[in-house]
Amino acid sequence: MNYIQSMSVEVPSFEEKKVDGGKNNVMFFKVIFGFIKGNKRWALEKRYSEFDQLDKTLKENYPNIPSLPGKTLFKMSDSASIENRRKVLNEYMKVSDNKMYTN
């Protein structure tokens, strides 16, 4: 069995955290990935800018993956917009993961 093909990825939540010694609030998205067989899972917290960099890096090797929507000029502050971004990230990670290992 190819263990890479049995990998799962999801972006289930987000949380605003203080950075720079408490001067700035930044949104972090929780990413959980693991292997379906063996029940191993890991969690990371990443900023949208890190997803943006990941997208650029992946595009170099996998040009057929979907594009991640661009960053906004101003910080998102309302929960509905942030939740929408979380859903987009979740779908992006699932589709990108699937396309990388089926091509």
Image (cartoon, rainbow, N blue to C red):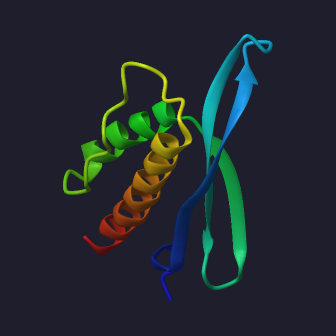
User: In the displayed image of the protein, which residue is found farthest to the left?
Assistant: 64
Percent position of residue 56, x then y: 32, 37
Rendered residue at 45%/41% (across/down): 81
Res 21 → quadrant? top right
Classify residue 7 as left or right of residue 68.
right
Quadrant in the picture for residue 25: top right
Q: In the rendered image of this protein, does residue 30 appear above or below residue 81?
A: below
| Residue 19 position (above or below residue 32) | above
Say whether residue 23 is left or right of residue 9.
right
Q: Which residue is drawn at 51% across and 42% down?
A: 82
Residue 93 drawn at (x, y percent): 43, 58
Task: Check the image and report above or below for 64 versus 38.
Answer: above
66 to the left or right of 2 = left
**Camera-nearest residue between 88 and 100:** 88
Q: How many marks?
A: 0
Q: Position of residue 67 (x, y in %)?
A: 26, 47
Q: Which residue is drawn at 51% across and 80% down?
A: 6
Closer to us: 42 or 71: 71
